Image (spheres, rainbow, N blue to C red):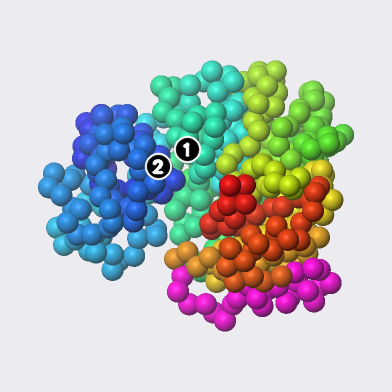
């Protein structure tokens, strides 16, 4: 594998530079005085930001983008081998690194690289930990998979030896990482277009945990099923947390305020340490908070600072994000696209002020819809009313016989109120006709469903 010497700036070219993670890596290298070029399918706010910092970006992806002087090319898992630009890089014989390989190499520049993994909750937990690190004035470098207002985007370049990033299991990309502290939030079936089954997924997380050195630390959710298949045989110290059972870090006396935001007593190794107040909704965020507290403790951050940091975190873009009101209808947007995430979001919504909960859901990929068809129906039935938009195909072309119309019928079989509408415009008109003052409307999914709420507010 090609090794980058971070002390000697080079010319790095990114295929797909506009992605949330790729753009963050490009920004880190720009601030280390590297020459950066790249390509994407179309301009965006992220690419405009990089261009303002000095990057050269081409649109769209094509062979002529591979200009002279490039030392190494970075690409993402979304880039296929028949991509014209990728093929030109191969033809020229230029060194190549995957996004994950570059991120793994970047970790070696820091004494304390921290990797946040799990099927769900990575962005929220990374953001929550970032707030604690900022409150503690540790001057961290942060790479988060969403927009975090506290750092004005998805990346922050600090000058300390602390680096925190998300670690995604898809295509086993996190196996290229070299963390000192790792967090595993949960392990469930997802990305079934890559993994064979849950055993394959657990094996992947076990290999990720095994990357830790002997003096490293694994912070892991004790609620994970078959936990020992992940922790057995690893050399690092294991710290457990749980919001529902005894663990090294646990919560007691959990309560919710009028907006569904939780507070709880922190119990550390059996001792009540003090009260933690969250500014984000949902019981799942109690669990996320416990993991960040355990990590912060390893960094010797005082409890009072942890308290302030957690309370200051009010969420990230597209995670139960308040968008506004129209005709007395509150509009929330959420990135949930897996049944477990949907259940967590809709359960949280029950604690939020509302008359009826309306959920506009856009399934994400045919593969995921097929793998969790019945689970999606059960999770969505927690809403009072469900509106289905067409499936967001993302990288897929085969429908596998799946459709949102079929999912709507499955939800109806469970006795829930469900509708399928073929366009965003039709959904928007339906919402304006049916919803009343006091209703809560949640746009949900990993695609472009967020546009519905934003169009309504316009």
Q: Nearer the viewer, mark 2 or mark 1?
A: 2
- In reply to whether residue 404 is colored magenta, the answer given is yes
Can residue 450 be seen in this snapshot? Answer: no
Q: Of residues 35 and 210, which is closer to you in this image?
A: 35
Q: Position of residue 321 (x, y in %)?
A: 64, 43
**Viewer-nearest residue: 272 or 233:** 272
Residue in front for this viewpoint, 216 or 192: 192
Residue found at x 57% / y 42%:
317
Residue drawn at point x = 18 percent, y = 53 percent: 66
Could you say where residue 297 lies in the image, as x and y percent from the top left?
64, 26
- Taking the view exactly as shown, the residue that stands out farthest to the left is 68
Q: Which residues are magenta?
A: 396-418
- On residue 154, the disc is 1
Circle 1 packing at 10 Å, graded few (<14), some (14-19), many (20+), is many
**91 drawn magenta:** no
Which residue is label 2 attached to? 46
Dot 2 and dot 1 residues touching (CB under 8 Å)? yes
Query: Is residue 377 shown left or right of residue 58?
Result: right
| Distance between the alpha carbons at the discs numbered 2 and 1 | 9 Å
- Mark 2 is surrounded, within 10 Å at the Cα level, by few (under 14), some (14 to 19) or many (20 or more) other residues, namely some
Image x and y of residue 259, in percent: 79, 38
């Amino acid at each position: 594998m090609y090794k980058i010497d971070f002390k000697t700036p080079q010319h790095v070219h990114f295929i797909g530079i506009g992605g949330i993670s790729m753009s963050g890596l490009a920004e880190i290298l720009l601030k280390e005085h590297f020459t950066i070029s790249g390509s994407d399918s179309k301009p965006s706010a992220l690419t405009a930001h990089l261009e303002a910092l000095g990057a050269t970006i081409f649109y769209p992806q094509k062979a002529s983008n591979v200009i002279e002087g490039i030392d190494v090319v970075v690409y993402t898992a979304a880039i296929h081998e028949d991509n014209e630009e990728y093929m030109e890089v191969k033809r020229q014989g230029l060194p190549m690194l995957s996004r994950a390989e570059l991120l793994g190499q970047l970790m070696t520049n820091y004494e304390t690289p921290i990797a946040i993994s799990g099927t769900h909750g990575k962005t929220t937990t990374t953001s929550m930990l970032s707030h604690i690190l900022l409150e503690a004035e540790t001057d961290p470098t942060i790479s988060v998979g969403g927009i975090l207002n506290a750092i004005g985007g998805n990346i922050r370049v600090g000058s300390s030896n602390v680096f925190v990033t998300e670690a995604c299991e898809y295509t086993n990309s996190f196996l290229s990482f070299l963390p000192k502290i790792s967090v595993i939030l949960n392990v469930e079936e997802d990305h079934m277009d890559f993994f064979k089954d849950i055993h394959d997924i657990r094996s992947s997380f076990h290999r990720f945990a095994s990357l830790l050195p002997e003096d490293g630390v694994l912070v892991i959710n004790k609620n994970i099923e078959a936990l020992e298949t992940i922790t057995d045989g690893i050399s690092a110290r294991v710290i457990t947390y749980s919001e529902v059972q005894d663990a090294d870090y646990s919560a007691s006396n959990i309560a919710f305020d009028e907006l569904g935001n939780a507070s709880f007593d922190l119990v550390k190794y059996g001792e009540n340490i003090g009260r933690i107040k969250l500014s984000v909704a949902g019981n799942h965020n109690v669990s996320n908070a416990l993991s960040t507290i355990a990590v912060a403790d390893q960094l010797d951050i005082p409890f009072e600072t942890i308290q302030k940091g957690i309370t200051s975190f009010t969420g990230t873009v597209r995670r139960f994000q308040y968008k506004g009101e129209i005709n007395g209808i509150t509009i929330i947007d959420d990135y949930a696209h897996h049944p477990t995430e949907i259940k967590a979001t809709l359960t949280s919504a029950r604690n939020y002020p509302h008359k009826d909960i309306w959920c506009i859901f856009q399934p994400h990929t045919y593969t995921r819809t097929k793998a969790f068809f019945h689970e999606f129906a059960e999770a969505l039935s927690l809403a009072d009313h469900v509106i289905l938009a067409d499936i967001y195909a993302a990288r897929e072309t085969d429908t596998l016989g799946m459709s949102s119309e079929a999912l709507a019928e499955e939800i109806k079989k469970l006795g829930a109120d469900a509708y399928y509408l073929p366009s965003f415009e039709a959904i928007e008109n339906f919402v304006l006709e049916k919803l009343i003052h006091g209703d809560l409307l949640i746009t949900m999914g990993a695609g472009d469903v967020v546009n519905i709420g934003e169009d309504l507010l316009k």
